[in-house]
Image (cartoon, rainbow, N blue to C red):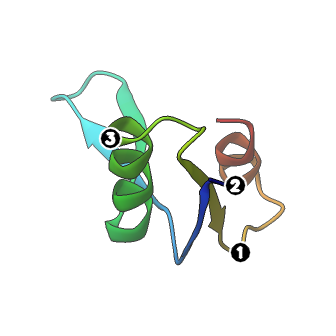
Amino acid sequence: MPPLQFVAIGECMLEVQAKGFGPSVLSYGGDTFNTAVYLRRCAPPSDIELSFATGLGTDHLSQTLRKE
């Protein structure tokens, strides 16, 4: 049986976590992004073909997300 095809469409938000006055930690999240991550963790690639569709800018943070 061919794998199911799933496309998550939405935004991926940049989360900035500050720890006092030290350096900030950047991570990514959001409802559609988290759903796609959890779906990938629950099913092997042979069962579900997963894609994520979103819009990205040309700024440094958007390009960093593209590489992740």
Which residue is under mark 1? Answer: 55
Name the amino acid type tagged 3. Cys
Residue 29, x across and y down, in percent: 37, 54
Badge 1 density bin: few <14, some 14–19, many ≥20, Cα 10 Å: few
Q: Is residue 32 left or right of residue 53?
A: left
Q: Earlier in the sequence, mark 2 or mark 1?
A: 1
Alpha-carbon distance for marks 3 and 2? 27 Å
Residue 4, x across and y down, in percent: 57, 62
Which residue is under mark 3? Answer: 42
Name the amino acid type tagged 2. Ser
Q: Residue at x 35, y 55 (%)?
A: 34
Placement of 53 over or under 13, stated as above or below = below
Between 28 and 51, the residue placed more toward the observer is 51
Q: Residue at x 32, y 40 (%)?
A: 42
In the displayed image of the protein, which residue is found farthest to the top? 22
Which residue is under mark 2? Answer: 62
Splitting the image into 4 quarters, where does residue 59 fall?
A: bottom right
Q: Earlier in the sequence, mark 3 or mark 1?
A: 3
Alpha-carbon distance for marks 2 and 1? 9 Å
Splitting the image into 4 quarters, where does residue 31 fall?
A: bottom left
Q: Secondary structure at mark 1?
A: loop
